[in-house]
Image (cartoon, rainbow, N blue to C red):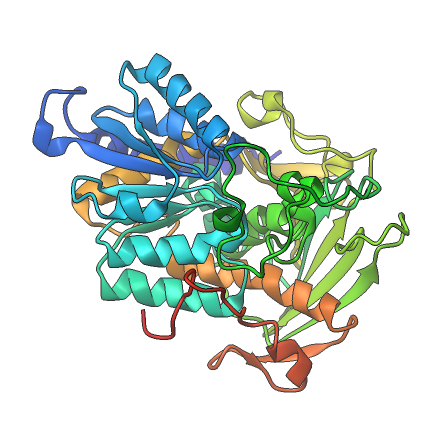
Amino acid sequence: MNEITRRHFVKKSCEGAAVIAAGATLLGPARGASANNRVLLALMGAGGRGMDLIKKFAEIPDVAVKYVCDVDETRGKSAVATLEKLTGAAPKLVGDLRRVLDDKEVHGVVVATPEHWHALATVWACQAGKDVYVEKNISLYIWEGRKMMEAAKKYGRIVQCGFQNRSAPYGFSARDYIKKGELGKVQYVKVFEMLAGVVGGYPLRPAPDSEPPAGLNWDRWIGPASIRPYNRNVHRGWYGCWDFSGGNASDAVHQLDLARLVLGDPPHPKSVSCDGGRFQFDDGGEMPDVQIVTFAFDKMVMTFHNTGSSPYNSKSPPEVRIGDKWPYWPQNGDRIEIYGSKRMMYLGRHGAGWQVFEGGNKLVAQDKGYHPDKWHLPNFIDCIRTRRQPNGEIEQGHFSACLEHLGNIAYRVGNKKLLFDAGTERFTNCDEANKYLRPTYRNPYVLTDAV
């Protein structure tokens, strides 16, 4: 490896980390030292990721959790007990977000529900004067993302998207390396989500409709989506239903976003095409287990390889994400490959880092990472106080989310090539595809044209 190159980019990464850490030090004095500096949060959605987020937020100095909002009373009570044990104070449990939004003391809402609630909850929170941390994927439809941007701007709110790689120092050093031309001219990028995934990797075993479990408000869980009878598979397996999720692509949106970041955040592609299907299991499942998407940009092509039947691949384990080990790239199931005219880069999400190779399997530069929640969450709190735009601001979050949506729409209209007008965010060669740009909301859970 070129040692000077290696030292330079490791140094740049450390400088980036120092900048982010410096932002975190602006969080103020120790907990309880200043009431005026205290940030009060509410959690909407107390599932696995929601609880992981809110526990990390609660450990930041001068941050407190005032509410847990969940339509499942049993899960909500468990979340309250966990937070009380962690912080010494029990948040209030509510089942309706609108009760939280009426409380003028609350500064921010952490939205970690299934994806069909993300846009509506974000817009409602902005309208109520709250800042928002919204989990990936931030929207379920392209139109929704545009409304989220409009609401954030109109009401002057901070909206941090749950694309935490935008706070990763090694993402910035990768971007700098590419911008300097060290890879040469980048014309082809491959993004992978090739795993034994939740949606595609297991057969769907039908369950009968039934009454909802005690304590679950099923109508509110469904929210803006079309009403349907309670079904255990839908409730616990919503990730496999188009009404509630973008499928495995919703996990891969992390890689799609990171790829956009290091490439300098290109705008919408000019076209998208898809090939795939549910090939492994003939079980009536809605989501594909093979989905190969091609995005055409100006003088660059990006492909997205999304499979749920690759048990020999895996995500980066903890010793890679929060340790000093490198992935074994050929079987890293959520890697990015960036091909330049001189060299190629392997890039991994959530702390995996990047390595650059040239001919003869020669490693010429690298920068190891660390899981970026440690910077991304304090960045949101800092921005609540300073009113600076966050690292994962809503506009770039929308552009990244749209890559998932574009690929899924191309699949759902029959694996077609679609031409996309970036200005209007509409397809120019397929009326059927335009029907998937915006949902039909169910009263009273309606996101209106005018936010």
* Front residue (pair 1, 419): 419
Residue 177 seen in this snapshot: no
In this rendering, position of residue 137 left or right of residue 98: right
Residue 117 in the image: state x and y as whole percent. 47, 52
In this rendering, position of residue 289 left or right of residue 227: right
* Front residue (pair 251, 114): 114
Residue 411 seen in this snapshot: yes
Residue 430, quarter of the rendered image? bottom right
- As displayed, is residue 429 above or below residue 44? below
Residue at 78 percent across and 70 percent down: it is 415
Residue at 61 percent across and 59 percent down: it is 404
Residue 140 in the image: state x and y as whole percent. 54, 59
- As displayed, is residue 429 above or below residue 40? below
Residue 83, quarter of the rendered image? top left
Residue 105 in the image: state x and y as whole percent. 17, 39
Residue 433, quarter of the rendered image? bottom right
Residue at 27 percent across and 18 percent down: it is 89
In this rendering, position of residue 170 left or right of residue 126: right
* Front residue (pair 180, 430): 430
